[in-house]
Image: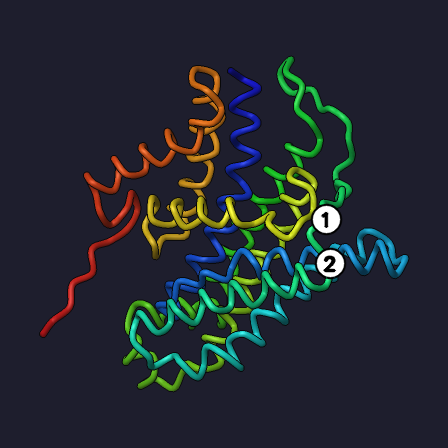
Amino acid sequence: MDQAIINGLAEGSVYALLALGLVFIHRITDIASFAHGEVSALAAFIGFTVFHSMGAPFLVGIVASIVAGGLIGAFIERVVIRSVQSSNLLGTVVVTLGLFFVIHGCVKLIWGPEVRPYPSMFGEGTVRIGGMGVSAQHLGVMVTAFLVAVGLAAFLRWTRTGLALRAIPQNRFGAILIGLNIRKLISTAWIVGSVVGAIAGVLIAPLTFLNSNMMQAPIIKAFAVAALGGLNSLVGAFIGGLALGVIENVAVLYIPTYFKDSIAFVFILAILLIQPEGLFGKLRKEKV
């Protein structure tokens, strides 16, 4: 049971980071990016190419993945999203779905469908905590996810840009009236959200191995986690990710492995039926 919980927290940390990036972009732009997982995969492949094919140190490859994630996010916002920002909900959904297939196709075209081992930045050892052995990879994933979440919270709370970003979902019209550069802040949201997604891609690659389909299952679960926690709640996204990971891994102790995903989504469905806005979401009220 203890090992299942540890494994669940490690997997849930990746779901949480992916969901954090999704929610961060959505709460500023009102766009749910279906291409978020493929951006993470593309960033991981770029970093892999830097250290594997170009011979750069592994740490340089990690940095390259993170930088690539930010640049891809900026490119998507500037070239694609800005053109359809004023479109209806269905239009933006179709655009991000289109981006999903375009990026997925490009990854498969450039790197092929092969599965590649991806080294762990935390090593292959085991750490003893309270008499229980925890793999360095799992521990590193959990600690990194926690530090990224804390860093994101600090960015929003104590920086001028973060405070400006928090003002937009509270009162977009008021933010425009006081002179905030909404276009620049939206671009910043895409960059930061994509960087968080790239970090998630780097963390999950050693667990699932590097391949063109590596982010398809995690991104579906990240969307579920975002809905579970509340689509505009960063805290809810993080806690929901950890909860989903633990539920999945504990469930397989008692049920067949192939039913693992179903049990987790039954739990999420039950929560959303009781509280449609999610565990930490707030019901939006609009005056007409």
Figure disc tally: 2
Tell which of 193 and 149 is nearer to you: 193
Tell which of 159 and 147 is nearer to you: 147
Q: Which percent across, then down, holds residue 170?
A: 29, 68
Amino acid type at mark 2:
Trp
Residue 108: name its quadrant: bottom right
Q: Which percent across, then down, holds residue 210?
A: 69, 47
- The residue that mark 2 highlights is 111
Whether tag 1 and tag 2 are in contact, CB under 8 A, the answer is yes
Q: Which percent across, then down, holds residue 157?
A: 45, 60
Tell which of 1 and 115 is nearer to you: 115
Q: Is residue 130 left or right of residue 172?
A: right
For residue 174, above or below residue 162: below
Residue, x 38% and y 49% (percent of image)? 226
Amino acid type at mark 1:
Glu
Residue, x 19% and y 39% (percent of image)? 274
